[in-house]
């Protein structure tokens, strides 16, 4: 399952600016922001261009099904109300 937050994390971990990655991937900074915030699902060609710009494998933008399922269930069961 694709995760835009993994795109953002990969970029930030390398200290790269969104504008720089967008320019190298030949997309707009706005579109990159939409991808990173899970508001757009890009074509595989676009993901490959972003991965090339960040210098990682495109597969790093995807969660394994069991990982994404456990993340969803742990987030939905998280309760931070005071006890």
Image (cartoon, grey):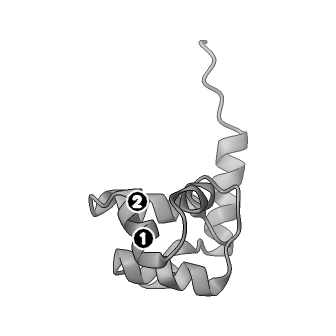
Residue at image position (66%, 70%) is 66
Residue at image position (55%, 55%) is 33
Q: Nearer the viewer, residue 38 or 17?
A: 17
| Image quarter of the N terminus | bottom right
Q: Marks 2 and 1: CB-CB under 8 Å?
A: yes
Q: Which residue is mark 1?
A: 23
Task: Identify the secondary structure beneath mark 2.
Answer: helix
Q: Nearer the viewer, residue 64 or 1?
A: 1
| Image quarter of the C terminus | top right
Residue 39 % position (x, y)? 70, 55
Callout 2: 10 Å neighbours few (<14), some, many (20+)?
some
Q: CA distance from mark 2 to mark 1?
A: 6 Å
**Which corner quadrant of the image does residue 69 belong to?**
bottom right
Residue at image position (59%, 71%) is 63
Looking at the rendered structure, the number of numbered marks drawn on it comes to 2
Residue 1 is left or right of residue 19, and the answer is right
Task: Identify the secondary structure beneath mark 1.
Answer: helix
Q: Nearer the viewer, residue 2 or 51?
A: 51
Q: Which residue is mark 2?
A: 19
Residue 62 % position (x, y)? 58, 74
**Which corner quadrant of the image does residue 57 belong to?**
bottom left
Residue at image position (34%, 57%) is 17
**Which corner quadrant of the image does residue 55 belong to?**
bottom left
Residue 13 % position (x, y)? 31, 59
């Amino acid at each position: 399952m694709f995760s835009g937050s993994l795109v953002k994390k990969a970029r930030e971990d390398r200290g790269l600016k969104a504008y720089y990655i967008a320019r190298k991937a030949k997309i707009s900074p706005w579109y990159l922001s939409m991808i990173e915030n899970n508001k757009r699902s890009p074509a595989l060609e676009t993901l490959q261009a972003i991965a090339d710009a960040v210098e990682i494998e495109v597969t790093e933008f995807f969660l394994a099904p069991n990982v994404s399922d456990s993340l969803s269930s742990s987030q939905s069961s998280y309760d931070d109300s005071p006890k």
